[in-house]
Amino acid sequence: MLSMTVLFGIYADRMYRISIHPEERADFPRPDYIDPALRFEKIAIHRDGQGMLRGRRKSMRFLYDPPTGAISLLSGKAEVLAGNVQTGRFNPAGLSVRLEANDTIYGFGAATGRPTRNDQSFRLLNLDTLFYSIPGASYSTFPFFIIRRASGVCTGVFVAFAGPGRVRTLNAPSDPEGPAVRMTPEDETRPVGFDFFVFEGTLPEILNRYTELTGRPFLPPAWALGFHQSRWSYRSEQEVLALAQRFRAEDVPCDAIHLDIHYMDGYKVFTWDPAKFADPSGMHKQLGELGVRTVAIVDPGVAVQENYAVYQAGLKHDAYCKTAAGAPFVGKVWPGRTTFPDFTRADVRDWWAREHEPLFRAGVSGIWNDMNDPTLWMGKRYDPLQEDVLHADGPHSEFRNLYANLEAQAANEAFRKHSKLRPFVLTRSAFSGIQKYAAVWTGDNHSSWAHLRENLNMVLNLGLSGVAMSGADVGGFAGGHPFNGVLKVVKLLKNRELFTRWVELGSLMPFFRAHTTLYSYAQEPWSFGEEALAIARKHIRRRYRLLPYIYNLAWESHLTGAPMVRPVFYEFPEFQSAQQHTQFMLGPDLLAAPVLEKGASARRVDLPPGEWYEYESGRKFTGGAQYTLDVSPGYYPLFVRAGAILPCSAGGKNAEEALFSGLALELYPAKTMRGRVRLDDLTSPGAMAGDFYDLQLSGELERSGNIQLKFTTLKKKFVPPFSTITVRLPPTYRVMQFKGKSLDGAATDLMREDRVQSVYSFELPLNAAEAEFEYRATWSL
């Protein structure tokens, strides 16, 4: 019998590792994209009398039958996972995880735009989808999925396989092979090992362990959570400055303008157009005075031009991917003949990081990695696996899906070399673990209602794949018409309703950017008339008022892997509803029911158990019920969960002004209440080393109706630049007892916040939160 290796390991609580290989090996593989510090306890494997391989630790049992490939993992009598593994020795290589007929599958990143992964097939290959025109193709690859049983019990599976492959999910019991998730390498005849991880528990527990394994989400600078404006392209310094000034004149908050390919000299990376961007430092100085930053696009392709210093430096460093003949591979992208750095080499990543210096010296705050699948031949349909491309350690097929992650890693290193800013990198392509380095946007979508809906589906599934910071191009990038291929870049017909509904949805997405193609009408908030501007202004301002809450969610993601935007069943595991894929939670306390259909005048909302407060009116709703609400232009249902202590701000022109303008705590009464505020200097890497302010809030509703609220300062390595905290309560609470004194609240009309309700506000000194203390707000008769 041919030799093989079967390994079984356990890490901490309910995370298991199974490695099955067609060759002998002494230990688990060590791919770069998982944390090498995690040590799995290797469980002894023995062969029983029937030839079955068995491993056991306490109640956990692992079984594998080499001849058939059957595999199972059991906890006591409960089956955690069952399926089949073939390494390609005797049968086509593949991994199959058995499903039950009513299972629902989530994850796989943004593999498709559907809300679940049931009954689908797609390719595991990072690819320029040519405006989503290639069936089964995706810009990114995430071999991680979650099975949700009808009971609400979840199991996560991560396959540490970065090569090209295919996924087929079938739920129909009538299928000859039964319902299963099947993952196969592109070449099923080639022997291959499967190293995969199984996670038990609740969704928060699974994502906590998964991101412990593949990397915690990066902590974005606060400005990255604000509104971003982009297009292909703003083509001069004057146009960029005029845009920033228009945002301030229209009183629409904005944090960043994106610089697409036309800021460069002939599309050459790390250059500035000498005529249209002649003084980038001066431009950034003026933008800084307006409180606006820039994010500059950086494609991986390097123009093959003899008089181009970056190209020559790469040649000198022998930095480029090669052909079988040993010459640099040359494709064709924006600058024409183009070659590509071999980011699999640490020295090449270091060189690439150094080349970013002209951008940071000019004042750029963020880096936007595009075309990083990588696109080898722009605008063409081709199979990149057939191209003659070699990396230092193997063929392009082995590293293509990792290429974008490695470039993002280099971009993060560029921040450390050239900037005092916390890194913000935006990427189109990705593999599992990208959350350590970059935010992901979902690529060149369409201006269509279908892609508006897919926006939500993709962000939810990216969140369930470890990527907390993601979003789609608000308003849609390409045409959304039936033209094929590159003709989709043409966009002629304005759709005000679609744009405003997309702004509403985008205002609650982790990454919030409007973007459009070069061959398009303008797509700024004022481009669709006064009514659309008023709607956009309302929801962008709301985003900034909610920034203390959103920023704390970014902290929570960074520390635990929790998605910022999450399905309702993440918070309510037993929640089943016909609307469960058209509603979502922003963190634990906000439930949104966006308008996703053209011409909708009413919207059904299914509320989970408990009490809920409609955000704009303060009206209380009882959960566990269905409601139909009017959704006039500019309104969609947004609910706050009873028991929330929601940190808010007065808003501002940008994130810094909003977060440093003061802090308001909105209380939504319930038997128990909780909230959290984390704040830091918003831009430096020091926060990740512990330099932040951490305030924990807890409250109780007593039988008398009084509310008792307790503040606990957990960390004070940063001192917020405001001296008071405002506490907002429903108008029945008009008096507060604090340190033995009775304090009257101030009636506050929230009309200026586009809300039709009143609250009572109480001012407290910030230093009161230096230690635990309590105060009461009592009902005024």
Image (tube, rainbow, N blue to C red):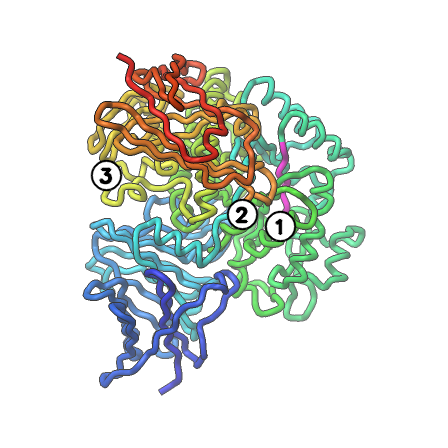
Quickly name the residue at label 1. 411
Residue type at tag 3 = Ser
Give how far across and how far down residue 351 sits, in percent: 70, 57
Q: Residue at x 59, y 69 (%)?
A: 393
Secondary structure of residue under mark 3: loop
Q: Residue at x 48, y 34 (%)?
A: 770
Residue at left offset 22%, top offset 57% = 100
Q: Which residue is mark 2?
A: 438
Is 640 on the left or on the right of 151, as rendered? right
Q: Is residue 330 visible?
A: yes
Q: What separation in Å lies between label 3 and label 2 (alpha carbons)?
A: 33 Å
| Circles 1 and 2 in contact, beta carbons < 8 Å | yes
Residue most extreme to the bottom: 1
Picture quarter with the N terminus: bottom left
Q: Is residue 296 magenta?
A: yes
- The local crowd at label 2, few if under 14, some if 14 to 19, many if 20 or more residues have their Cα within 10 Å, is many
Query: Mark on residue 577?
Result: 3
The answer to which image quadrant residue 699 occupies is top left
| Nearest to N terminus: mark 1 or mark 2 | 1
